[in-house]
Image (cartoon, rainbow, N blue to C red):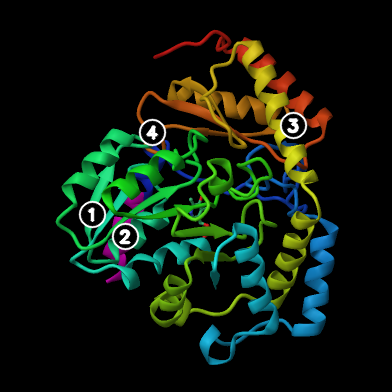
């Protein structure tokens, strides 16, 4: 049997290569951080990780992880409700609730699981889920697992959302689901308008804070803080794998009855292992660092403004954004691949994105800034952008 299947796989793989969509892993031999060494020996400055607050290699977190290993062991060998809940898991759930100013929190092994286990326990065929067209794959998959009627609105388009709300009035409950920051443009979901429409048409609101928590808002606490929507968003999901230390783990946080029902019914919570103590201990240290002061968020914001201002002044075409994602628009797919390759020869690690990850004719370089970048790192990246941009003739905005 395998022979035929192998031929089929080989064809599929060849097609992926031919389409220019083959993904290669670049092997790093150092910890994740603003500067990396690759297995090839190349040293690069890193502008394509989600390490927004620069915490991935923070010694306070590695120390806390080591301590938790000592006090709470290596693995949990259980799901939460059998014998996988330690005092530190409860403390971490409380720390997440405190950070987002919510009533209760449930931890998952990843945000992919938080989203995968969110919709099915809460909604049935009598209900509606209304989803932004650019939502993350895990939200899309989570929605697929539930029987609610599905509606989709164009990215951050409030009149289209209103259309969905009107069309779904016959359903019992409506839930609007959106990413907080959309990962390709770095744009924010307009939460004030979303909450207003939700109240007008009777809908619940869910926001995935994976790219926004720690980043967006006056002190980095995400969309509710940015748009002053506290109390109007029913539930948030998020990851511990981006700004919050970058290891692994996810959560859903929000109204207490919702969280309580998820603890009874959410399948990735019931049937998948507890987070290991090292991650839980480090995450607790991370939240206490963020509670002490806003230094990391202030540094990140400073870096974003510094970088964006200089890129715009140099004549690059940037998507407007208030997040740590900076989309440098090149429009042409080949140009974006060539640009990224030349940046790597200049020692700058950035990613080129083209169709089908972004719409056709919307190819770009995505730059992700971090509080861990020093001014000299930003200057080196800017110099490389200027050099490559000049060589490839992309300094004046050019629409394909
Ligand atoms: C990264 C991301 C996830 C997945 O998070 P993991 O914890 O890595 O599974 C989910 N949703 C959004 C919006 C993301 O950006």
The Cα atoms of the two marked residues, 1 and 4, are separated by: 25 Å
Choose the circle earlier in sequence order: 3 or 1.
1
Give the side of residue 5 with respect to residue 97, left or right.
left
- Which of discs 1 and 4 lies nearer the camera? The answer is 1
Q: Give the answer, above or below, for where 260 lies relative to 50.
A: below
Task: Assign a secondary structure to mark 1.
Answer: strand
- Which of discs 2 and 3 lies nearer the camera? The answer is 3
Please check the rendered image and state whether residue 261 is part of the magenta-colored stretch, yes or no.
no
Which residue is drawn at the image coordinates 39% and 14% (left, top)?
400
Q: Position of residue 27 (x, y in %)?
A: 66, 50
Which residue is drawn at the image coordinates 52% and 35% (left, top)?
186
- Residue assigned mark 1: 150
- Which of discs 2 and 4 lies nearer the camera? The answer is 2
Q: Dividing the picture into quarters, in which one does residue 297 lie?
A: top right
Whether label 2 touches label 3, CB < 8 Å: no
Choose the circle earlier in sequence order: 2 or 3.
2
Q: Is mark 1 within 8 Å of ligand 1?
A: no
Q: Position of residue 135 (x, y in %)?
A: 39, 47
Whether label 1 touches label 2, CB < 8 Å: yes
Which residue is drawn at the image coordinates 41% and 57% (left, top)?
138
- Residue assigned mark 3: 302
The Cα atoms of the two marked residues, 1 and 2, are separated by: 8 Å
Choose the circle earlier in sequence order: 4 or 3.
3
Instruction: Tell me if mark 4 has few (under 14), some (14-19) or many (20+) residues whose alpha carbon lies within 10 angstroms of its own.
Output: some
Q: Dividing the picture into quarters, in which one does residue 327 lie?
A: top right
- Residue assigned mark 4: 355
Task: Assign a secondary structure to mark 3.
Answer: helix
Q: Which residues are magenta?
A: 1-12
- Residue assigned mark 2: 143
Q: Give me the disc on residue 254.
A: none
The Cα atoms of the two marked residues, 2 and 4, are separated by: 24 Å
């Amino acid at each position: 049997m395998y022979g035929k299947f192998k031929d089929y796989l080989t064809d599929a793989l060849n097609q992926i290569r031919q389409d220019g969509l083959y993904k290669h892993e670049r092997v790093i031999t150092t910890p994740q951080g603003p500067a990396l060494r690759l297995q090839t020996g190349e040293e690069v400055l890193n502008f394509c990780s989600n390490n927004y607050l620069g915490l991935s290699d923070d010694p306070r977190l590695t120390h806390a992880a080591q301590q938790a290993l000592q006090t709470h062991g290596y693995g949990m060998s259980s799901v939460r409700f059998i014998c996988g809940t330690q005092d530190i898991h409860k403390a971490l759930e409380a720390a997440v609730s405190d950070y987002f100013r919510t009533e209760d929190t449930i931890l998952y092994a990843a945000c992919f699981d938080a989203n995968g286990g969110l919709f099915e326990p809460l909604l049935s065929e009598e209900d509606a889920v209304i989803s932004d067209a650019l939502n993350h794959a895990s939200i899309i998959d989570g929605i697929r697992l539930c029987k609610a009627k599905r509606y989709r609105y164009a990215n951050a388009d409030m009149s289209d959302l209103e259309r969905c709300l009107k069309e779904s009035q016959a359903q019992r409950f409506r839930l609007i689901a959106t990413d907080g920051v959309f990962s390709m443009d770095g744009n924010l979901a307009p939460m004030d308008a979303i909450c207003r429409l939700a109240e007008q048409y009777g809908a619940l609101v869910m926001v995935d804070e994976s790219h926004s928590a720690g980043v967006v808002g006056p002190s980095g606490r995400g969309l509710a803080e940015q748009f002053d929507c506290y109390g109007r968003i029913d539930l948030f999901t998020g990851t511990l794998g981006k700004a919050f230390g970058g290891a692994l783990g996810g959560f859903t946080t929000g109204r207490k009855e919702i969280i309580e029902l998820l603890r009874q019914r959410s399948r990735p919570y019931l049937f998948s292992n507890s987070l290991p103590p090292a991650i839980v201990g480090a995450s607790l240290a991370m939240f206490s660092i963020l509670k002490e002061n806003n230094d990391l968020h202030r540094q990140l914001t400073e870096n974003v403004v510094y970088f964006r201002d200089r890129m715009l002044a140099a004549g690059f075409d940037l998507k407007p954004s208030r997040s740590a994602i900076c989309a440098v628009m090149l429009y042409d797919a080949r140009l974006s691949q060539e640009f990224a390759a030349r940046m790597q020869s200049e020692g700058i690690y950035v990613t080129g994105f083209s169709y089908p990850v972004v719409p056709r004719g919307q190819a770009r370089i995505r730059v992700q800034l971090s509080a861990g970048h020093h001014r000299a790192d930003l200057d080196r990246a800017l110099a490389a952008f200027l050099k490559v941009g000049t060589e490839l003739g992309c300094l004046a905005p050019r629409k394909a």
